[in-house]
Amino acid sequence: RALLPKSSRGLSSVAADWAFPVPVTFGAGRAAELPAKLRERGSNRPLLVADKGLSGTPVVGGLFDSLAAAGLQPRLFGEVDANPTDLNIVAGAAAYREHAADGLVAVGGGSGLDAGKSIAMVAGSGRSLDELEWTRPPVEEMSCPPLVLIPTTAGTGAEMDSAAMYTDTSRRVKFCVAHPGCTAQIHVIADPLLTLSLPPTLTAWTGMDAVTHAIEALSVDTYHPMCDGIALESLRLMHTWLPAAVADGSDVAARSHMLAASAMAAVAFQKGLGAVHGLSEPVGAVHNSQHGLTNAILLPHVLRANRAAIEPKMDLAATYLGLPPPPPGYATTDGGFERVAAWLDTLAEQLQIPATLAEIGISDETAEECAAKAVANPTGFTNPLPFDAEMYS
């Protein structure tokens, strides 16, 4: 298996250790610290979790080999679907127990990270996914093993807390599990070198997931200036660095800043999300669509539907990002909303984001089903305007 990429002199990157909101080891080459981080936390038999698309790559192979070379006894569970399912999590929890694991390393984008967190919660506690559903009161006496999360995309920000999405295969609905006891066990290793192999399409789609997180978090009508400030700085970083990362995947500076921006956007949406996610999660559950791409398609439509409630926040974003007046064809050249809308339209065109779900093969045959599930989806409850089934469809 290939060795992990190593940092060298001349790489344009940043490095730091953060303690908020979870411990984060950030910087190029810092994945090499994984064995030490596990040992510090008493883990010698970790389960390494990744999705099917990533499990056979040099990224996962290098991490596995680094653990084995350090004298640890890892086992790989690489059977996670692109949209993790309840069946994946049950199988992963069984693999954890069979290995007599004492810790877990989750690697990847949202798929591997969410599956890993879910497996850790189920295997560590013996609880079912239903018992751990995030809208229920947290179960007492929760046990969760040491958990190291290693993102390989700059999009979901799933490394920043315990919340984990999965698809219930029998009901074709996405649910979320979470527990503060799991959050307390998280340590993040954010190494931009592990994102260098991500192709331009996935770089764009996952990056737009992070943009959506920041826009929706900022738009939530709740007083939380801390999250608003983090969302704005996340947008500023992505305004500069997302096009650069898509244009040149080997640009370590771009990859570093996008990894930070993605994490920040995830912190910001502790405030809440909105109708983009309210609908994209049911669409993903029904059609197995790529989450970031689905969000990117829906974002401009939801933005305009929310206009009456979010103009002050968009004024703030336009000013902070220094956005220029929109080109001819937009309603006005004065307000911040049109400047943000024009920026997002231009970004979508630059990143080759389709304008409609139909362009990715999703017809209106399931519109009523997806809309009904969106109305019932708690993720959309913090949208700044209430959406009914007609608006979603």
Image: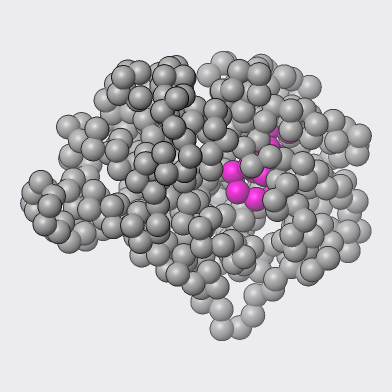
Q: Residue at x 36, y 30 (%)?
A: 275
Name the residue located 83 percent from the left edge and 47 percent from the top edge.
76
Give the magenta range. 105-119
In this rendering, position of residue 71 left or right of residue 58? right
**Which residue: 76% across, 36% down?**
145
Residue 334 is one of the magenta-drawn residues: no
Lateral position of residue 138 relative to residue 12, left or right: right
User: Is residue 72 visible from the viewing direction of this image?
Assistant: yes
Q: Quadrant of the N terminus?
A: bottom right
Rendering quarter of residue 213 = top left
Relative image position of residue 246 (x, y in whole percent): 46, 65
Q: Is residue 22 left or right of residue 320?
A: right
Whether 126 is drawn above or below 258: the answer is above
Q: Is residue 172 above or below residue 244?
A: above
Q: Residue at x 59, y 66 (%)?
A: 196
Residue 147 can be seen, yes or no = no
- Residue 110 lies within the magenta run: yes
Colour scheme of the rendered structure: one colour
Q: Position of residue 35 (x, y in %)?
A: 79, 57
**Residue 283: x percent and y percent?**
49, 31
Q: How many marks?
A: 0
For this rendering, which residue is in front, 16 or 220? 220
x, y (%) of residue 165? 59, 32
Q: Quadrant of the C terminus?
A: top left
Magenta stretch: dominant secondary structure: helix
